[in-house]
Image (cartoon, grey):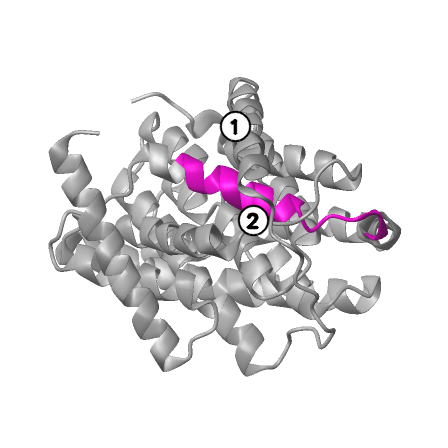
Amino acid sequence: MSFPELRQFLITSLIGTIGALVAIAIGFPAPYLIGPAVAVSFAGLAGLSLEIPHIVRNACFVIIGISMGSTVTPEIFVAARTWPLSFVMVFVAVVILLFAAAWVLQRLFRYDRTTALLAASPGHLSYVLSLAAEMRCDLRAVSISQSVRVLALTISVPLIVEIFDLAGNDVVVIPQSMSIPILMVMVIVSAGFGLLFQRWKFPAALLVGGVFVSISTHITGSVSGTVPNWLLIPIYVLLGSLIGSRFSGVSLADLRVALVSGLVVTFVVMALAAGIAVTVSYVADVPLDAALIAFSPGGLETMAAMAVMLNADPTYVGAHHVLRLMFLSVLMPFVIGRDARLK
């Protein structure tokens, strides 16, 4: 990391930390995500060049994956009997959200079909932007629309859970933290599996690597305990800062139309996803807070972190988001079809 990159990272982290402290003072739910995301977004729109380096971002994903997997116990598999219907609804939800949002973008904002489909994709930001870079479409519109969706969901989902008192009332037993030596081994092994999954083109490979190793060791009893808060809280702050940094370097002129379209589409998909989540919660007897986070078309890493912070079932949430991203990986090239012409 060069000195300018280090300085940029430190400034981004400082702004994110200030945002987290303000969010805590105000009493926002999930303050370590919301505060940094909002603060860094405004700072980026004000003209600051802000960024979280890839190596830091990747480390965050690995640790969040380990944190998710550490909640898995044998009792989880007993509850999994109700998940098949919920899993089927993931496919239904993705198709509904994708085509509803694309229709809105084409009809109301006159996006061409390819740009509309890519901007409407309910998740998988890095994959969608990679596709957009190789196609004849408005890459800036796709990027801004997708970033608005991630930011809006990061802010709104925990607020909805808090305002409507949807969080579970069960007493949460805080597990003992892992020892530092065990945690270090877990991180190294998880990173290794994450890199392997990257070669195999898994979505969110580094996070999945952490989840895989953590579940494997916790379910067998080889390892117990979770990621300590002294590490997890800074990771959440960095993740929130990463979300906000996507608006760095975007001018207000470029932002105006894409921002409005992104907000409209986000509202549409949130309403549809909430309706699906309520249905799944009722039919499959899943806690409503977990269903809302599981079916929200936000970033996998962000929604996973949110599930942990809001005491929703992170295994249920993580499994649904991984399934959504894998389905999108296959679905997007298929629905774009003939429009997928190289530039």
Q: Is 317 positioned to the left or the right of 233 in the image? A: right
For label 2, the residue is: 227
Q: Is 175 positioned to the left or the right of 257 in the image? A: right
Q: Is 74 positioned to the left or the right of 279 in the image? A: right
The answer to whether residue 277 of the structure is visible from this angle is yes
Q: Residues within 10 Å of mark 2 (few under 14, many from 20)?
A: many
Q: Is 253 positioned to the left or the right of 27 in the image? A: left
Query: Of 280 and 53, which appears nearest the observer?
Result: 53
**Looking at the image, is 183 positioned above or below residue 236?**
above
* Mark drawn on residue 188: 1
For image coordinates 58% across by 24% down, the residue present is: 193
Q: Magenta segment range?
A: 58-75
Q: Is residue 62 magenta?
A: yes
Residue 256 x/y as whole percent: 21, 60
Q: Residues within 10 Å of mark 1 (few under 14, many from 20)?
A: few
Task: Work out how far the residue at label 1 is from the one at label 2, CA to CA, in angstroms.
Answer: 14 Å
* Amino acid of disc 2: Val
For image coordinates 43% across by 37% down, the residue present is: 59
Q: Is residue 92 magenta?
A: no
For image coordinates 36% across by 81% down, the residue present is: 26
Dominant SS in magenta: helix
Residue 221 x/y as whole percent: 78, 40
Q: Quadrant of the C terminus?
A: top left
Query: Of 136 and 230, which appears nearest the observer?
Result: 230
Q: Secondary structure at mark 1?
A: helix
